[in-house]
Amino acid sequence: MDKKKLNWIYKKLFTIRFFEERIKKIAKEKTVPGYLHTCIGSEAICVGVMAALNNDDWISSTYRNHGHAIAKDCDLKKITSEIYGRKTGICKGRGGSMHISDFDRGMLGSFGIVAAGPPVVLGAALQEKINNGKKMSVSFFGDGAIHNGAFHEAAGLAQLWNIPMLFVCENNGYAEATATDWHLNTKELSDISKAYDMKSYQGNGNDVFEVYKITNEAIIESKNNEIPIFLEFKNYRFSGQYEGDTQLYQPKEEIEEAKNNDPIKLAIENSINHGLNADKLEEIKNIALNEVNEAFKYAETQPWPDPEDALKEVYVSYPKENI
Ligand SMILES: Cc1ncc(C[n+]2csc(CCOP(=O)(O)OP(=O)(O)O)c2C)c(N)n1
Ligand SMILES: [Mg+2]
């Protein structure tokens, strides 16, 4: 791996962790309205997959989307401003935390509705196939999403129509308060793909380099053979379902044990093997922290959207006198 990509990987890992720690803080302070979902523990999946993608490849995300948006290189200040509901947000402050999207970066949308992403990404991938496009299409979703019909419809059609795309499942051990082994009816989560005769691979979602390698190879295989591929990355949801969740259903010992495999801890331990010395690591960390601080400083001072803009850019324009 070249140095530029290596530095990018570490910077993104740190940026996501610092960002989500700050989100936890503002959630406690009730600085912004609405639900906030953090992805602490998912950094290696966000960064490992995105490291294998091009900037304009298509992705969909969920309400646990900050890490995906950051790793997709969406503007950090605009992401933060969006979460604060401000006019300069990435969606002009209309979407908030759960709906960050940025078509210029291939970020087709973040969906609060579980499993809403896979059919959208299937559409993008179908369009690439019809138009001989080169962009890869990747849908991120959680373990809970594999029980939703929309996932099954997308998986069935992708296989039937030979669509190159990746279904990336972040198996973080929980769907809301339900542990994965309580809701699975197959031995392994990725076995679900067998119902569609779809190829699948599993990987350690805490190891950014393993995620990157598996995704890279899967993209090549998917494109060469014109097939969809299901990837299951196992990790641990350190955060609650949402900020403010008491997490009483997650045993304390389980959380402590999971800390041994914290993706940031593993990446730091691994850094020397990849030729990054402690000084360089510290430098990258400081740059990441500084950018996060700057982004929050920016968002806090941005103007609110104008109320009269609320009716612009909607599907239907009503005559003013009827409102
Ligand atoms: C269609 C639908 N059903 C139920 C919900 C309520 N809900 C919100 S998050 C969630 C759990 C999803 O868990 P998972 O897919 O594992 O994602 P994670 O939160 O672990 O990232 C549920 C059931 C929803 N948002 N959409
Ligand atoms: Mg989950």
Image: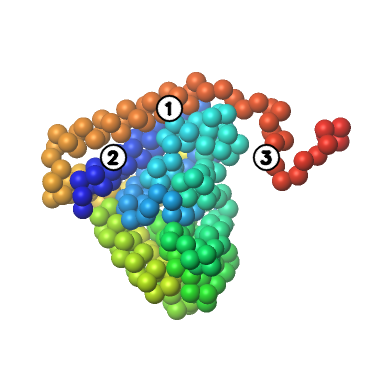
Label ID, residue 296? 1
Front of the two marks 1 and 3: 3
Say which label, 2 or 1, has the lower sequence index: 2
For label 2, the residue is 11
Write down the quadrant of residue 75 in the picture.
Answer: top left
Residue ranking furthest to the front: 132
Label ID, residue 313? 3
Front of the two marks 3 and 2: 3
Q: Residue at x 58, y 66 (%)?
A: 149
Of 317 and 246, the residue lying toward us:
317
Say which label, 1 or 3, has the lower sequence index: 1
Q: Distance between the residues labelled 2 and 1?
A: 17 Å
253 relative to 234, above or below:
above
Give residue 138's position: percent from left, percent from top. 44, 59
Crowdedness near tag 1: few (<14), some (14–19) or many (≥20) residues, C-alpha within 10 Å: many
145 relative to 191, above or below:
above
Q: Do the residues labelled 3 and 2 touch (CB within 8 Å)?
A: no
For label 3, being within 8 Å of ligand 1 is answered no
The residue type indicated by label 1 comes to Phe
Q: Residue at x 54, y 63 (%)?
A: 127
Left or right: where does residue 283 sit relative to residue 55?
left
